Amino acid sequence: MRAVLQRVSRAQVAVNGEITGQIGLGLLVLLGIGRDDTEADAIYLSEKIAGLRVFEDPEGKMNRSVQDVGGSVLAVSQFTLYGDVRRGKRPSFDAAAPPEKARLLYEFFVEQIRAAGLRCETGRFQEMMQVELVNEGPVTILLDSGKGF
């Protein structure tokens, strides 16, 4: 499971002009589900994200988590995180989970974030979405449940 995590002052996702999720201070999580991913991967990433210290403390050091600052999470499914462009110029998505499996693990991930006590807004699975954000910092972190990076 892969995630691109962005620290935001605000973010929203819309489908056909309808806002499906919107947050203020918090984390935008673009989440990709791989073919071999399991619930254990979702648990690992949700725990990592809930506790990741990427918000500044009074001294200006990144020492506070989204939980510490009372922030929210906007989770957006993004299978293109498994795009492989090592050969040619068109991405291959063979490593991405099939939609049925990906939907279940995405929804499980969202449940885990909420179980951690965080407000979690979402996009709409398998839809064309428009994502808007104000990245604070900018701070962008790459996460991989297989610890590949």
Image: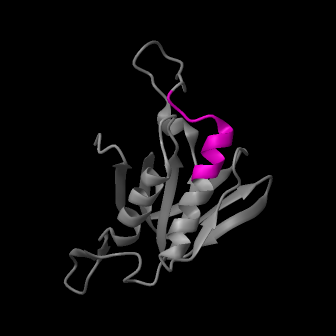
Residue 43 appears anywhere in the view: yes
Quadrant where the N terminus sits is top left
Residue 24 falls in which quadrant of the image? bottom right
* Residue pictured at 22% horizontal, 78% vertical: 60
Residue 101 falls in which quadrant of the image? top right
Task: From the viewer's side, name the closer residue of 57 and 79.
Answer: 79
Task: From the viewer's side, name the closer residue of 133 and 15.
Answer: 15
Q: From what the image shows, is residue 1 above or below residue 123?
A: above
Q: From what the image shows, is residue 69 above or below residue 2?
A: below
- Which x, y percent locates residue 61? 20, 75
Where does the magenta region start and end? 95-105
Residue 67 falls in which quadrant of the image? bottom left
Task: From the viewer's side, name the closer residue of 116 and 118.
Answer: 116
Quadrant where the C terminus sits is top left
What is the residue that sits farthest to the top in this orientation?
Answer: 88
* Residue pictured at 74% horizontal, 64% vertical: 19
